[in-house]
Image (cartoon, helix red, strand yellow):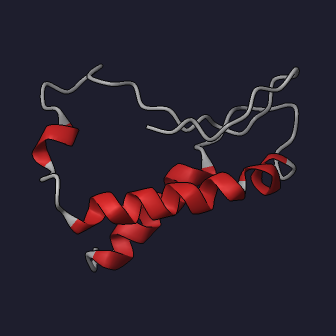
Amino acid sequence: MIHLRRATAGLMMRGTDETSGSLFSYVDLEARIPARHPLRKIRQVVNEALASLDADFEVLYTDFGRPSIAPERLIRASLIQILFSVRSER
């Protein structure tokens, strides 16, 4: 996983784009997706695009309050929802 958030001196309320590994899962998700699956290439392209937007995301967040979900995670989730025609239950 690419860590897209740069280190800052202060505590920002922008969530980090990190995975917790196998904290609550006994299944390795990387092993479940075939090496040649199209999502792997899409993820690579999306991660590169999001890395270029890192500075833009950073200025949108305040220095106080509760940390949010990382915008990179939200964008990836929305993209998967669109690609697989997942309906929102909201």
Q: Is residue 78 above or below residue 27?
A: below
Specify whether residue 57 is in view. Answer: yes
Left or right, 52 with reference to 82? right
Residue at position x 87%, y 41% in the image: 62
Dividing the picture into quarters, in which one does residue 23 lie?
A: top left
**Front residue of this view, candidates 52 and 77:** 52
Query: Which of the pair 79/38 is nearer the observer?
Result: 38
Q: If the image is split into quadrants, where does the C terminus sit?
A: bottom left
Direction from residue 34 to residue 46 in the image, left or right: right
- Residue at 68%, 33% in the rendered image: 67
Tell me what residue is drawn at x 53 percent, y 62 percent: 75
Q: Quadrant of the N terminus?
A: top left
Residue 46 in percent (x, y) is at 49, 62
Q: Position of residue 74 (x, y in %)?
A: 52, 56
Question: Depth check: 17 or 14 in front?
Answer: 17
Q: Is residue 56 above or below residue 19?
A: below
Question: Residue placed at 76% from the left, 53% from the top?
Answer: 57
Quarter assignment of residue 63: top right
Horizontal and vertical percent position of residue 40: 30, 57
